Image (tube, grey):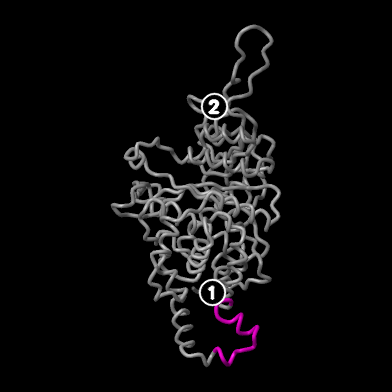
Amino acid sequence: MTTLSPTIIHILAPFAIIFSCSKTLTKAALLMTGAILCKGGRTVCGSLKVMGLRGEKAFTNYHRVLNRAQWDALKGAKILLMQIIGSLGITELVVALDDHIERRSGEKISSKGCYRDAVRSSRGFLVRCFGLKWVAMMVVTKLPWSARVFALPFLTVLAPSQKANRARNKKHKTSVDWARQMCFQLRRWLPDMPIRLVVDGAFATAQLAWTTLKLNIGLISRLRLDARLFDFPEMKNGSGRPAKRGCRLLGPKALLESEKTPWQEAEVQWYRGRKKKVQYVTTTCLWSPVGGEAIPIRLVVLKDPRGQFESAALMSTDVTLPALVIITEFVKRWAIEVTFREAREHLGIETQRQWSNKAIARETPALFALYSIVILIGLQLDKIPVRTAAWYFKQYNTFSDVLVEVRRILWRDKYFLQVFEKGDLIEMFTREGFIEEIVDHLAEAV
């Protein structure tokens, strides 16, 4: 068995309780190390090769870690969340939530469906693809060595298609249904911590809003421009049923078109780390979706005086939040899209080859969790160099910089640490087959 890196052992120590036995834990740690070191497809065999186990005849035992072994992924998500909160000293949690389509095909992948491909589609051109829909929840925060906002995944849930649920005689759950269930789980884990949930307009529904109000979670979301808005009802002293809504107010679209709208101007933190001047108007009102109960919200209608971006309406179920805080928190939501991109590019999302239901439900969430684990390892490092090129200049660290540094440490722990501690460098280089072995493994990594 290949010796595990002390860095990996230290990070995985809190996760030991989720595994049924120590052998499964050791195999999972080895696969995780291989997933960090290898490039290209994140398959079980790819991880074994980069860890020097080309001759492992019992390779099926490593596949069984995903498709057969007993371990609690939900408990692992809680441990990962607590590690993120503890490492960064978070006292007020900001969480982003969105769905992600993993392009996969194959007759044996039963949970797949046909969805809109958000990466390839545009406003005037629709592209559909077959794949798996995942609903991911991530901690949005800044890291000590970077000015950029990062989104760290900790809980990822598979949302099977309607056709797949019908074939299994199961009740279909939409992405909003899964989001509500994840909010309940998050509040069980953190019963007393202040939480803000930031979502896109696809999740701006009355069901999710009422769920967050019940759980004392502040929801920040985009709102439709034709949303129905009402004033708060007046107090009624006489007989009869009291009114649920007051008089109807101008909607976001009417406010944008009206010349009497009292716009305010401010400079806010915008996308790509820039400052931008925007105009906004804010009010507290009732949002009344068709067929649903009225919901108290803080409304922020936003526009660009230069016309460089499309006007938008934002809302928050926490009516005490200032308008500029709502704008800033919603802009941070874009970090979740960056995480999706970096996970595909650097961690091999969409390159897996598992097809059993249990392995599919485990492998992609594990790779998303690996993103956060790499960041946690990076937080323990004193310094992370910013890697630039003549054609690519950047001022701050990105995930690729952290991943390169973590790989360097893992290679050091695997081949050089014990040798330098013992001062036995000559014996290492004179050992038969050492040069061929290390060149072979480094070639697999590069």
Q: Residue furthest left?
A: 107
Q: Residue at (59%, 47%) from the top-left corner?
A: 95
Q: Main secondary structure of the magenta part?
A: helix
Q: Position of 383 compared to 64: left or right?
A: right
Which one is nearer the viewer's eye here, 399 or 244?
Answer: 399
Which disc, if any, is residue 3? Answer: 1
Is 420 part of what is drawn in magenta?
A: yes
Q: Secondary structure at mark 2?
A: loop
Q: Position of residue 261 (x, y in %)?
A: 61, 34
Instruction: Indicate whether 417 appears above or below 271.
Output: below
Q: Residue at (36%, 60%) from the top-left corner?
A: 353
Stretch of the chain drawn in magenta: 413-428
The disc, 2 or 1, on the residue closer to the chain's N-terminal end is 1
The kind of residue tagged 1 is: Thr
Q: Residue furthest top?
A: 239
Question: Comparing marks 2 and 1, which lies closer to the viewer?
Answer: 1
The residue at which mark 2 appears reads as 288
Distance from the alpha carbon under mark 2 to that under mark 1: 60 Å
The kind of residue tagged 2 is: Ser
Which one is nearer the viewer's eye here, 194 or 81?
Answer: 81
Q: Position of residue 403 (x, y in %)?
A: 55, 68
